[in-house]
Image (cartoon, rainbow, N blue to C red):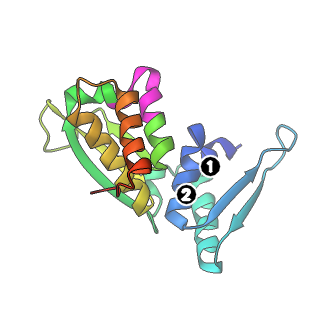
Amino acid sequence: VYVGRVIGKGGEMIRDLQARSACRIDVDQNVPPGQPRLITYRGTRKTIDFAKQLVHLLCQENVNEADLPLGEAKREFLVVPASSVGKIIGRGGEMIRELQSRSQAKIQVDHRGASGLDASQKQVTMTGSAESVVKAKEMVLFLVANPMMDAMQSIGMLMDDKMQRGGVWGS
């Protein structure tokens, strides 16, 4: 029943849980529909216990992700121009999925507008390992800084720069 909640859309929740616990979590999907899934945890006793606790919490009826302890994960907030939100999310969410996949961080755009921000600003939240958050932040800032450039092309360019030229993330 809760397997979808643990894995999340496109695997984003399980990546989030792994970042919080610093533990590898695998869900065996090769079981008949309706049967319990086997979850394998790999890490130290401490990280495994914490990962199990997170999964247990997530499987409670009235617990949502905001209630989970961050553990080893980092969370950063960026304020971006509201006019950049479409570019960050992309058509049908394709860009934000790409950013999450490439950075391995969970990226959320607050559409309501965080307190203290005017209508021209939106808050972006990035959660994951320290490295993934640095990558996500740089990618989002790069998109915001290059509004006229195609989003996929600009992220491709940024990735090439990091891979080919040995650029350091967050520099």
Magenta residues, start to end:
88-97
Residue 4 percent coordinates (x, y): 65, 41
User: In the current view of this chain or complex, which residue is farthest to the top?
Assistant: 91
- State the separation of the CA atoms marked 2 and 1: 8 Å
Residue labelled with disc 2: 17
Which residue is identified by label 1? 6
Q: Are marks 2 and 1 in contact (CB under 8 Å)?
A: yes
Where disc 2 sits, the SS reads helix
Q: Residue at x 88, y 40 (%)?
A: 32
Q: Position of residue 119 (x, y in %)?
A: 14, 30
The 10 Å Cα crowd at callout 2, few under 14, some 14 to 19, many 20 or more, is: many
Specify the amino acid type for callout 1.
Val
User: Is residue 83 placed above or below 157 in the rendered structure?
Assistant: above
Would residue 33 be found to the left or right of residue 166 on screen? right
The three-letter code of the residue at mark 2 reads: Leu
User: Does 56 sit left or right of 106 as displayed?
Assistant: right
**Magenta span contains residue 145:** no
> Which circle's residue, 2 or 1, is located before the other in the chain?
1
Q: How dense is the environment of label 1, judged by Cα within 10 Å: few (below 14), some, or many (20 and up)?
A: many
